[in-house]
Amino acid sequence: MDQATSKIPVGISRCLLGDNVRYNGDHKHNRFCTSVLADHFEFVPTCPEVEIGLPVPRKPIRLVDMGNDVRAVESDDPSRDHSIPLLQHGRDYARAQPDLCGFIATPNSPSCGVFGVKLYLPNGHPVNKTEGLFSLALRQSNPLLPIEEAGRLNDAGLRENFIVRVFTLHRWKNLVSTGVTAAGLVAFHSRHKYLVMSRDYAAYKTLGRLVSRLDQPDLQPIADQYIKLLMAALETPPKRGTQCNVLMHLMGYLKQVLSPRDKQELVVSIEDYRRGIVPLIVPIALLRHHFEQQAEEYAYPLQQHYLAPYPHELGLRSHIF
Ligand code: SF4
């Protein structure tokens, strides 16, 4: 499959690159980002707290629930409130970086954290979990953007799903950069069918219906709706059962040509994956092998991004059980 040759622009919390910008003058260097993802992503770093003018080192900030509002205030002096600049920086960064295809955030940070940032009551008691104010503003300003925390990238399923979403959004941006056409939308959808089916069958049907009514003068509203639905469908990592359905669908293309022995081998590999014995890459590699024996005849399944949603060398599906 074709992959863009240039690196994909992806935002990142600056301390993950090893820069000493944390409140205590330290960093949160993430080797997976700098040694693996950096080969494919052009990182666009930001340290929201430094960029709103705070020094290094600085007083730590925490999120406080004020009733109808969450504020980012200094832990030992709540009158020093940095909420508005952090939210504004999130909006400014989103506006200044429209080409971003993803963002990797530092966990637990009241500015950058996404999923489990501690929220305190004004009396200092932790009360709940929320997201950092920079990330909140970034997400609201760019709802299509896949945003993931660096810590969660240690989970094979979450990691793969984030990378899939980044590459998918990148392909979409490449498509629309040359102008939205009916042929372009149909071709894009055609190549993403099984990827969507592996995540969300209802979305697969809805997206199919959307691209079946492209006989309209202005395709932009449909394109906007399409990518919104697609990125939402890809948000949740696929389950083994839906992956197996897609693998069986793809195997259907080969039913006339596989020898009984090859068929049995493929069925066993899918079943072994279903039972958690072998990783996803095993049945996928077998399928690809058979399709590539007659690449011309199997051009359609071979062009499915499901079979290769990102560069092979990332090797992520070797860890998906
Ligand atoms: S978590 Fe965000 S705000 Fe905190 S040091 Fe890292 S980049 Fe800066």
Image (spheres, rainbow, N blue to C red):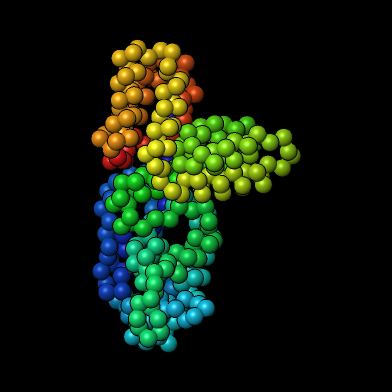
The percent position of residue 215, horizontal first and vertical second, equals 72, 35
Decide if residue 272 is on the left or right side of residue 145. Answer: left
Q: Is residue 53 visible?
A: no
Identify the image quadrant of the C terminus: top left
| Residue 244 x %, y % | 39, 33
The percent coordinates of residue 68 (x first, y second) are 52, 78
Question: In the rendered view, would you say 74 is above or below 263?
Answer: below
Left or right of 105, for residue 210: right
Q: Nearer the viewer, residue 160 or 129?
A: 129
Asked which quadrant contains residue 123, the reply is bottom left
221 versus 293 height, above or below? below
Q: Position of residue 188 (x, y in %)?
A: 55, 35
**Horizontal arrangement in the rendering, residue 91 relative to residue 120 (left or right):** right
In front: 229, or 25?
Answer: 229
Q: Residue at x 37, y 60 (%)?
A: 105
Residue positioned 31% across, 70% down in the render? 22
Is residue 258 visible in the rendered image? The answer is: yes
Q: Nearer the viewer, residue 144 or 123?
A: 123
Please, is residue 129 above or below residue 78 in the view?
A: above
Residue at the farthest right position: 217
Residue located 29% across and 52% down the image: 154
Report the residue at 53% width, 56% height from top. Answer: 143
Count of labels in the image: 0
The N terminus - image quarter: top left
